[in-house]
Amino acid sequence: MKRTAIMVLICIAGVAAATVACKQKNDTPVVTQEEKSEMQLKVEEYASVDLTSELVNSLSDNEKQLIDIFIRIGEIMDDLFWKQTFGDKAILDTISDSYVKDFAMINYGAWDRLNDEKPFVPGYGEKPLGCHYYPVDMTKEEFEAFNDPDKNSLYTAIRRDEEGKLKVVWYKDEYKDEIAKVCELLDQAIEIAEDEGLKKYLVERKKAFETDDYFASDMAWMDMKDSKIDIVVGPIENYDDRLYEAKASYETFVLVKDVVRSNELAKFVTMLPDLQKELPCDPKYKTFVPGTSSDMNVYDVIYCSGDCNSASKTIAINLPNDDRVQAQKGARRLQLRNAMKAKFDMIMLPIAQMIIEPEQQQDVKFDAFFWNVTFHEVAHGLGVKQTINGKGSVDDAMKTEKTTWEEAKADILGLFLVCDLIQKGEITEITEAEAVTTYIAGILRSVRFGATESHGKANILCYNVMADKGAFTRNEDGTYHIDLEKSREAINYWGGLILKTQAEGDFDFAVSFREEFGKVSDELKNDLNKINGAGIPRDIRYNQGKSVLGL
């Protein structure tokens, strides 16, 4: 990502609402905001970023060859995600409007992911809650009556047999042609990989694709400590399945490690058990002991595809999701610094300059954003994984509320941990005021993801709870004043409530609380309209691939 490109885009965002007919070098008038079509404006909500990294220059020829193979694997994952979330990608060939086509590429289909999944391609109605993980005509009653032990597996698709009855099909069979191509490419990568940890992971990941058993490969990935390049690939997250949150989506990240910055984070791994003990809740709600084989590393993302490339872009990774792996080895938390920096410069800083009162704008810092995101991922591994009252796992007990409450937990406890470590003198680059002010500005960035997206729903909850507890108030001019003392109280209250709700598996309370605090108020709606009206991008989109990387 080039600094000059960022500055140009910031300038564009700053004047987007103006109607000045500027001149290009060839004296052709630039189309004014009023003259643009609705779909052009929608596409321009995503600021374009060249996905590059100076870290690539330090890689060996062998590592660059591996990146080439990884990107080819990623292209297959991209096609698989199209099949899962939408079906026939041939829709793109039927769209004549270039902006509609671009927006369909951003959203992987005909529905706007950051606007409550509303259709934008003529002829399409509501998006199926289960996408194409299930038959689109399947009813919940039909699924609940379907008796198959594998129906809720992350790695099975639900289909109909010749008689029209439901059946389970494992991903390895449903997508066997694509999986075969992936395994061929993994064989090539295994052959030339020099880092032993990476080689072992690739061997195990190939087996996982062939068997739909990802445990051994996740364990091998946890042990991969020294490789300068990484590939996170496979069916991983289940956010796209809005019916049961049971089916995993295919995706790919290709990453290059920032060794210097990663070494600076290493000390925090050993602190995880102690940080767990300090969470603001009753001791019985924080009995899980995080593994200290966890990693906290900094990477640049140089390619992404599938689920992680749809609509809003990921700025940090916290994997594996398998509780068995987390219990034995913890998790790896990968901070995608170049993606973070792009979002901060292009989106978050302009929002803060519009919303935060002038006297406190100086407290919105990229370093604070980086630490908040870093410990958001740490917080995912804290609390408990099993309910304390026999309701099974937290995920099972929380049902359709699980991802929203989990993201809210990570948000608010991430901030709690950052403030705690600042007070202890472990984080010295920022102040507590900077952490909190940057967090609140960040909520306004994330709320724009929409009320149907888990991160967006979580941020609406966080915003409303913080407002209810007086963490911020509005001045007469509409700007926010942050109250640091009341923010501390709100952080402790909200973090403790989430941990209690998860540990007790209180699904009914989670639903009722979200219904009360998960609404976008008129004041917040006005703030968002002001931000949107200023032409500030909602998110970023990547111009990526081997040519962009110079490979």
Image: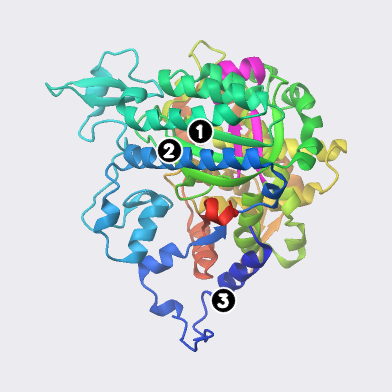
Q: Which mark is residue 376?
A: none
N-term mark: 1 or 3: 3
Q: Residues within 10 Å of mark 2 (few under 14, many from 20)?
A: many
Position of the N terminus, as image quadrant, is bottom right
The residue type indicated by label 2 comes to Met
Residue nearest the viewer, comparing 127 with 71: 71
Q: Residue furthest bottom?
A: 27
Could you say which quadrant of the image residue 359 lies in?
bottom right
84 left or right, relative to 408: left
- Tell whether position 316 is magenta: yes
Residue beneath the point at 57% across and 35% down: 231
Measuring from the top left, give residue 222's x and y in whole percent. 64, 23
The residue type indicated by label 1 comes to Val
Residue named by callout 3: 15
Could you say which quadrant of the image residue 399 lies in?
top left
C-alpha gap between disc 3 and disc 2 = 37 Å
Residue beneath the point at 46% across and 50% down: 311
Q: Which mark is residue 77?
A: 2
Residue beneath the point at 34% across and 65% down: 98
The residue type indicated by label 3 comes to Val
Q: Residues within 10 Å of mark 3 (few under 14, many from 20)?
A: some
- Tell whether position 13 is magenta: no
Q: Are marks 1 and 2 in contact (CB under 8 Å)?
A: yes
Q: Which mark is residue 233?
A: 1
Residue nearest the viewer, comparing 227 with 364: 227
Range drawn in magenta: 315-336
